[in-house]
Image (tube, rainbow, N blue to C red):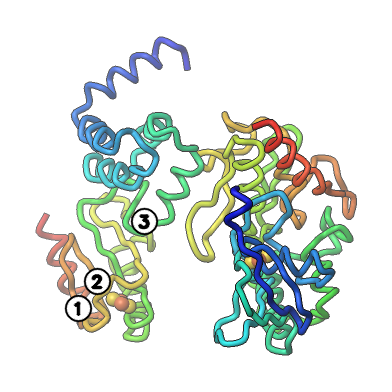
Amino acid sequence: MNATSVRIVTLKIDDRELSAREDRTILEVARENQLDIPTLCHLDGLSSSGACRLCLVEITGIRRLLPACVTTVGEGMEVYTNTPRIQHYRKLILELLFSERNHVCSVCVSNGQCELQELARKLGVDHVHYPYLMPELPVDASNPRFVVDHNRCILCGRCTRACDEIEGAHTWDMRGRGIETRVITDFSDPWGASSTCTGCGKCVHVCPTGALSEKGRSVAEMVKHKHFMPYLTLMRKEQS
Amino acid sequence: MSAKTDVMEASEQKADPRWRSVEKTMRQHGYHANGLIETLHAVQEAYGCLDEEALRRIAAELRVALSHVYGVATFYNYFTMAPPGRHTCVVCMGTACYIKGAGEIMERISKEFNVAPEETSDDGNLSLLSARCIGCCGQAPALVVDGEIWGGLSADEVIERLRRVLNDA
Ligand code: FES
Ligand code: FES
């Protein structure tokens, strides 16, 4: 990008005066300044899609709440990241995620390592006010090394983005819409039958929950490594 | 699958007149990925549904990931991957129609003609589908039967008319 054409703007986040390049997102600027905004579908190194809405913030003068991960900063913006209204919605979003599929942590490979679980703990979600739908979704273990358990999937889309943007295979995508949405490999074929999957395992490691895991892991054993994503993006940029 | 049958299938498909219109659409869009939706329309028009073999070829020709083609094909209500029955009935389940009893209409049709929602009856006579708002809320509850809009009918009237349509064939 042409550095000279990028303006610097000043803004306030949670009453702190900050300045930043105008092409940065609120999330980036907040985090650089040690202000934490919870996120789920965002992952450093991947593009942001604004899918989970957990990073919603309040901006003075705008009635709607906006996702910090895809909203760029503006001159004179006043952003609030932790108002009662936002806290309320964040909890609500998490509760809806928990109620939609099967998230019984005690029997999950990711128990103790799960981003959904960790966020619920951090934001004080100790109760789900909605009936659990508990659909019985398939578990695909056809891949020799990995498993996808749709019951744990929250459709954040990180696997699809990592596969497309970093690995360049675009094996993963999503099919259907609404409550019928599922992550798929190729033509909704069994993962093991995929003709495009390179078996790199990036999807597994970027998955925030126990939806994607390595075979042979038992309860709480699936530790994921996500830090290599920004590293890969950086190294690839250097090359090109 | 052996290489020989592969080649045979490809040439068979080339000769298939249905494929020609699909090919034409792709050509019009310069075999560019952004012509995907138009091409899917062409497939559905020519084949009556989104034929799997055709979709796989499109993915290759437009250089779009298979999973992406599948995702787009299943996202839009208008597209269907299953060959349709002789007659199709789309029940609108949008908010307005739902409030006006679309749920009951769906159930009644399903029972009466022995066909599960989103499926085709065993005799291949009727496909029963649903949509989320077809843009005729003023006529709720709205249905589309063989391309024709039926609005403001009671469940009984719908069954009655539908029976006539099905027996006609
Ligand atoms: S992290 Fe911003 S919408 Fe999910
Ligand atoms: S809700 Fe049925 S047409 Fe709009």
Is residue A101 visible in this depiction of the protein? Answer: no
Rendered residue at 42%/30% (across/down): B60
Query: Which residue is rendered at x = 61% and y = 64% of the image?
Result: A70
- Amino acid of disc 2: Leu
Of B149 and A42, the residue lying toward us: A42
Horizontal side of residue B90 vs A144, given as left or right = left
Answer with the quadrant where ligand 1 appears in the image. Answer: bottom right
Q: Is mark 2 within 8 Å of ligand 2?
A: no
Q: Which mark is residue A132?
A: none
Which residue lies most toward the bottom here? A84
Q: Residue at x 36, y 86 (%)?
A: B99
Secondary structure found at label 2: strand
Q: Amino acid at mark 3?
A: Glu
| Mark nearer the N terminus (2 vs 3) | 3
Residue for badge 2: B143
Tag 1–tag 2 contact (CB < 8 Å): yes
Q: To which residue does mark 3 refer?
A: B119
Q: Left of A210 or right of it: where is B71? A: left
Q: Is residue A96 left or right of residue B13?
A: right
Upstream in the sequence, badge 1 or badge 3? 3
Image-quadrant location for residue B56: top left
Q: Do circles 1 and 3 both sit on a common chain? A: yes
Please give the name of the residue rendered at 38% of the width and 59% of the height, measured from the top-left corner.
B118
Q: Check disc 1 and give the amino acid type.
A: Gly
Look at mark 1 in the image and give the residue it sits on.
B151
**Is residue B95 toward the left or the right of residue A102 in the image?**
left
